[in-house]
Amino acid sequence: MFYEIRTYRIRTGAVPAYLKLVEEEGIELQKKYLENLVGYFQSEIGPLNQIVHIWAYPSLDERERRRAALANDPAWQAFAPKIQALMEEMENKIMRPTSFSPLR
């Protein structure tokens, strides 16, 4: 299993608007294509205005296939600019669990 960890820094004061958009419009679109949501988080201590979401994929090829399908959905194409306007920075990592990790 591979884990994609996406970290977004949201404009100061815009986290509530971002979360509302994702909850009302975005998350169902994402889950339709990406399916394996591990968690969706917002920062409370440390660097503020951060959103982190983690998705699991059985392979990198499957991740690529699913993300391409999401990107080609007209509803996603209409939605994405709404949240991108609230973001200042985006970081993406692909992580693979160790042999002793509880998440495999």
Image (cartoon, rainbow, N blue to C red):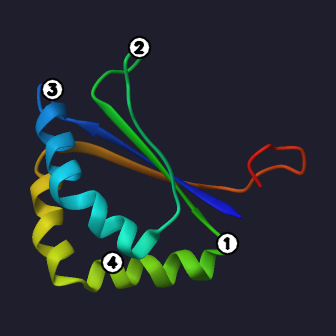
Instruction: Looking at the image, tell me whether mark 4 or mark 3 is earlier in sequence order.
Output: 3
Q: Residue at x 14, y 50 (%)?
A: 21
Q: CA distance from mark 4 to mark 2?
A: 32 Å
CA–CA distance between discs 3 and 2?
A: 15 Å
Question: Which comes before the other along the chain, label 4 or label 1?
Answer: 1
Q: Which residue is disc 2 drawn over? A: 45
Q: Are marks 3 and 2 in contact (CB under 8 Å)?
A: no
Residue at mark 4 to residue at mark 3: CA–CA distance = 28 Å
Residue 72 location in percent, x, y? 27, 85
Q: Which dot marks residue 70? A: 4
Q: Amino acid at mark 3?
A: Thr
Question: Percent from the top left, x then y, of residue 82?
Answer: 10, 57
Mark 2 and mark 1 residues within 8 Å of each other at the beta carbon: no
Q: Which element carries disc 3, helix, strand or loop?
A: loop
Specify whether 18 is left or right of 62. Answer: left
Counting residues from the start of the chain, the first of labels 2 and 1 encountered is 2
Q: Amino acid at mark 1?
A: Pro
**Residue located at (21% from left, 41% from top):** 19
Please give the label number shown on residue 12.
Answer: 3
Per the model, the C-alpha gap separating discs 4 and 1 is 17 Å
Task: Give the mark, 1 or 3, whose residue is nearer the N terminus.
Answer: 3
Between the C-alphas of marks 2 and 1, the distance is 32 Å
Quarter of the figure that contains the N terminus: bottom right
- Mark closer to the observer (1, 3): 1
Looking at the rendered structure, the secondary structure element under dot 1 is: loop
Q: Position of residue 87 (x, y in %)?
A: 20, 44
**Which of the 4 quarters of the picture holds residue 43?**
top left
Q: Earlier in the sequence, mark 3 or mark 2?
A: 3
Identify which amino acid the numbered label 2 is placed on: Ile
| N-term-proximal mark, 4 vs 2 | 2
- Residue 58 is marked as 1
Residue at x-position 22% and y-position 49%: 23
